[in-house]
Image (cartoon, helix red, strand yellow):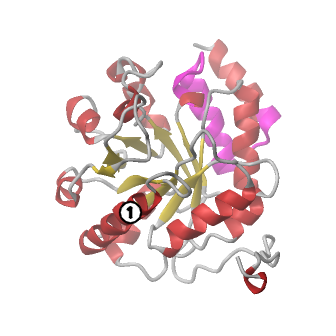
Amino acid sequence: MPEADTEGQRFAADKPQAAPGFFLKGSHQLDWGMKNRLARVFDPASGRTVMLAIDHGYFQGPTTGLERIDLSIVPLLPSCDALFCTRGILRSVIPADSTKPMVLRASGGPSILKELSDEQIAIDMEDAVRLNAAGVGIQVFIGGEHETRSVHNMTRLVDAGLRAGMPVMGITAVGSNMVRDAKYFRLACRIIAELGAQYVKTYYVAEGFETVTASCPVPIVMAGGKKLPELEALTMAYNAVQQGAAGVDMGRNIFQSEAPKAMIAAVAAVVHKNIKPAEAFELFKALKAKG
């Protein structure tokens, strides 16, 4: 890029972005219906969310821990703030009497056997409204082979969401050959926000994550990523929210845990109550021992 456009350092990560009249940054000028759906996903008291991500099957089939969602995930619904799933799972497995907000996977196409960035929009906004969804989520492959198409997919979904009052979560998709550092995630998250997503899901990085959240004008939720030991996962979640994330969207670090109910309770304590990782890990062990 031209020297004059070299990325600056004035992130002011210690000064939160103002959100006059609404508790989520960048959301105060949205329509009532959009705000209401966001307030179902994000706890107005803490301003954060613990989303449970179980959408993995849309491209990799019956993932470990998701073979029987009726047995492994439905019992966890009372403990999460929102569920991130596909419309197929919602209709076939999730009880209709659940009052938890549902965020629906809205992109798809290739499986793990193909080039993952070759996605399309995979749900009509009318169907998301029919399912009483609280939001939709779509992958955006910044730097990927089909980058432009994935960005266009998101902007089309944002337009449809604005017509229906449906928030869109843009998800930073990272290919196997991409560098996972703060510079890349600043780029990806800012592009997603600039082009209209109401919130962004991205990965945590140990160095400079506060610059990622500070330079993104809409809320960021942290992706859980690969399965980690429980203390490491709790530490990652704690660091993310302390450095500006508005919560987490965790999957494998919860449903692949030896004690998923204990783990999601510990994650919620970290996210909503700012409990430190060591204390949260002791809570996990105590709840695990109780069965």
Q: Position of residue 70 (x, y in %)?
A: 32, 22
> Label 1's element?
helix
| Region in magenta | 254-279
Q: Who is closer to the viewer here, 55 or 258?
A: 55
Q: Main secondary structure of the magenta part?
A: helix
Q: Position of residue 82 (x, y in %)?
A: 43, 46
Residue at 69%, 43% in the rendered image: 237
Instruction: Give the vertical position of 225 relative to 142 (above or below).
Output: above
Q: Who is closer to the viewer here, 136 or 152?
A: 152
Identify the image quadrant of the N terminus: bottom right
Instruction: Give the vertical position of 278 relative to 64 (above or below).
Output: below
Image quarter of residue 213: bottom right
Image quarter of residue 279: top right
Q: Who is closer to the viewer here, 59 or 233?
A: 59
Q: Is residue 123 left or right of residue 50?
A: left
Check if residue 188 falls in the magenta segment.
no
Going by the numbered disc 1, the residue's amino acid type is Met
Residue at 41%, 25% in the rendered image: 75
Q: Who is closer to the viewer here, 33 or 166?
A: 166
Q: Classify 10 Å Cα crowding around label 1: few (below 14), some (14-19), many (20 and above).
A: many
Q: Position of residue 107 (x, y in %)?
A: 34, 49
Residue at 37%, 30% in the rendered image: 57
Instruction: Identify the residue position indicated by label 1 in the image.
Output: 154
